[in-house]
Image (spheres, grey):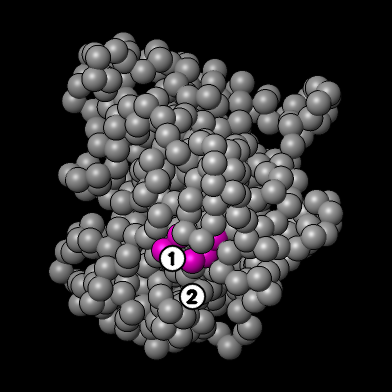
């Protein structure tokens, strides 16, 4: 057996390293890279001893490694989203489930969702105050939540109103619990975990009702919503998804398609207000009916401000050779998205916000990785790109976003996602409507 060879790293106790990671998540990673290089080993709560990678060649090799050699890291969001979630599934079960979930978020179906997103954006923008500062993150959260609810369930109603009220509480609490160990003693509804499981039971009850209602719908095969497509989908052997798996996957889609997209949009506002030349060019393009520079800007926001910092794998064989390293069975491997995106060898002048870097070249999906990579790349990446495009287009068409000379907003961890510290603060005034050629928001091939 090949001898194990791990990267160097700090020797401080696990609790100390965990506190360091909690208090200095962004700067701390950069300091570790400066001290140890583009790969280092940390020892933190929940994951234990983990190798952190930011070398592009080693990350590509990891993403291309078969599931038999390295699978999704444990623990993961599956413990919150359920055993039927793509986060929890491994091997053939993951592959089969993913195959059923890809079609609703690609191709012609994206066009059906675009109208929904613009309607929800217009509804939210109508409440924006003018000429005074306000945080855009809550607005972006409402837009993305309402849009994904309508895309998933296809209609309005009392059950969707209940989900609108319940999901934000559930997502906020779940995000904070994502990095917290499961309790050994059940403290009931008085504990954070107890409250979360209470939310989950309420969610499951609503979903059970929606599934039963959809099954009774004589026009189910004519519907474009995700729930209808999931109920009609079949595995290769002709069997259907169970109701419990559908509930887990619906929760996964609602959570993953909500908070991260909204947070990226808040970062877009934060970046654009501090780069007036980019903002002017975007407004001119909107007025002309174009979209190429907007596509590039969204890609650059995701490079410069990735809302998810780490994705991981876990070694499943006795030893795995990965670039310079030999990793033992059970070894956790974390890919630092932020460190990769800050690499000057991959992105010249990485600390400059420059959308033009993506105008003439699509990003390399093993180097630009806000959606993760390999067989576990986010199935909703194309949907998220289209949604951000529509929201940004509608906002710039209807409002003037005023630049600022204030300092950059600091990174603020919401548990899972990294958000702008002031919520993507904006000052706007309504524009006179400009008639422009109709331009689909899904023309970009960047994602």
Q: Which stretch appears magenta?
A: 53-58
As drawn, the label of residue 343 is 2
From the top left corner, tell me how far across and down residue 15 is, in percent.
83, 51
Q: Is residue 175 magenta?
A: no
| Mark 1 touches mark 2? (CB < 8 Å) | yes
Which residue is depicted at the point 66% across and 71% down? 36
User: Relative to 336, does residue 221 appear above or below in the rendering?
Assistant: above
User: Relative to 23, does residue 110 appear above or below in the rendering?
Assistant: above
As drawn, the label of residue 56 is 1
Which residue is depicted at the point 64% across and 28% down? 199
Q: Nearer the viewer, mark 1 or mark 2?
A: 1
Which structural element holds mark 2? loop
**Residue 81 visible, this angle:** yes
Instruction: Give 257 or 327, whichever is nearer the viewer.
Output: 327
Instruction: Give 277 or 381, whichever is nearer the viewer.
Output: 381
Q: Is residue 182 left or right of residue 161?
A: right
Q: Is residue 192 left or right of residue 197?
A: right
Instruction: Give 61 or 352, whichever is nearer the viewer.
Output: 61
Which residue is depicted at the point 47% across and 40% down? 70
Instruction: Give 51 or 351, whichever is nearer the viewer.
Output: 51
């Amino acid at each position: 057996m090949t001898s194990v060879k791990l990267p160097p790293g700090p020797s401080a106790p696990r609790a100390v390293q965990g506190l360091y990671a909690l208090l200095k998540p962004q700067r701390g990673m950069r300091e570790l890279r400066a001290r140890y290089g583009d790969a280092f080993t940390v020892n933190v709560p929940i994951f234990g001893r983990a190798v952190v990678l930011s070398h592009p060649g080693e990350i590509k090799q990891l993403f291309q490694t078969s599931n038999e050699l390295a699978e999704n890291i444990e623990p993961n969001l599956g413990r919150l989203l359920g055993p039927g979630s793509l986060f929890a599934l491994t091997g053939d079960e993951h592959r089969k489930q993913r195959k059923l979930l890809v079609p609703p978020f690609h191709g012609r179906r994206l066009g059906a969702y675009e109208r929904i997103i613009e309607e929800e954006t217009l509804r939210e923008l109508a409440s924006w105050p003018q000429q005074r500062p306000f945080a855009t993150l809550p607005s972006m959260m409402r837009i993305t939540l309402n849009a994904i609810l309508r895309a998933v369930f296809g209609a309005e109603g009392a059950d969707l109103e209940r989900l609108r009220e319940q999901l934000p509480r559930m997502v906020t609490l779940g995000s904070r619990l994502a990095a917290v160990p499961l309790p050994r003693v059940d403290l009931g509804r008085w504990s954070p975990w107890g409250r979360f499981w209470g939310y989950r039971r309420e969610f499951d009850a609503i979903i059970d009702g929606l599934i039963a209602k959809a099954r009774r719908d004589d026009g189910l095969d004519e519907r474009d919503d995700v729930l209808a497509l999931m109920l009609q989908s079949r595995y290769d052997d002709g069997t259907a998804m169970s109701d419990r798996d559908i509930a887990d996957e619906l929760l996964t889609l609602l959570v993953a398609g909500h908070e991260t997209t909204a947070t990226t949009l808040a970062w877009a506002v934060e970046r654009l207000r501090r780069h007036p030349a980019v903002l002017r060019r975007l407004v001119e393009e909107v007025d002309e009916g174009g979209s190429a520079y907007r596509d590039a800007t969204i890609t650059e926001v995701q490079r410069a401000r990735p809302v998810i910092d780490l994705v991981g794998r876990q070694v499943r064989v006795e030893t795995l050779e990965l670039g310079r390293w030999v990793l033992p069975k059970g070894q956790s491997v974390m890919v630092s998205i932020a460190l990769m995106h800050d690499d000057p060898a991959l992105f010249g002048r990485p600390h400059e916000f420059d959308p033009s870097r993506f105008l003439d070249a699509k990003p390399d999906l093993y180097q630009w990785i806000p959606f993760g990579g390999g067989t576990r790349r986010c199935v909703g990446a194309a949907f998220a790109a289209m949604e951000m495009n529509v929201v940004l287009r509608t906002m710039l068409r209807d409002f003037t976003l005023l630049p600022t000379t204030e300092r950059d907003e600091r990174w603020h961890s919401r548990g899972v996602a990294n958000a702008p510290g002031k919520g993507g603060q904006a000052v706007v005034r309504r524009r006179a409507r400009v008639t422009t050629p109709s331009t689909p928001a899904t023309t970009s091939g960047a994602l």
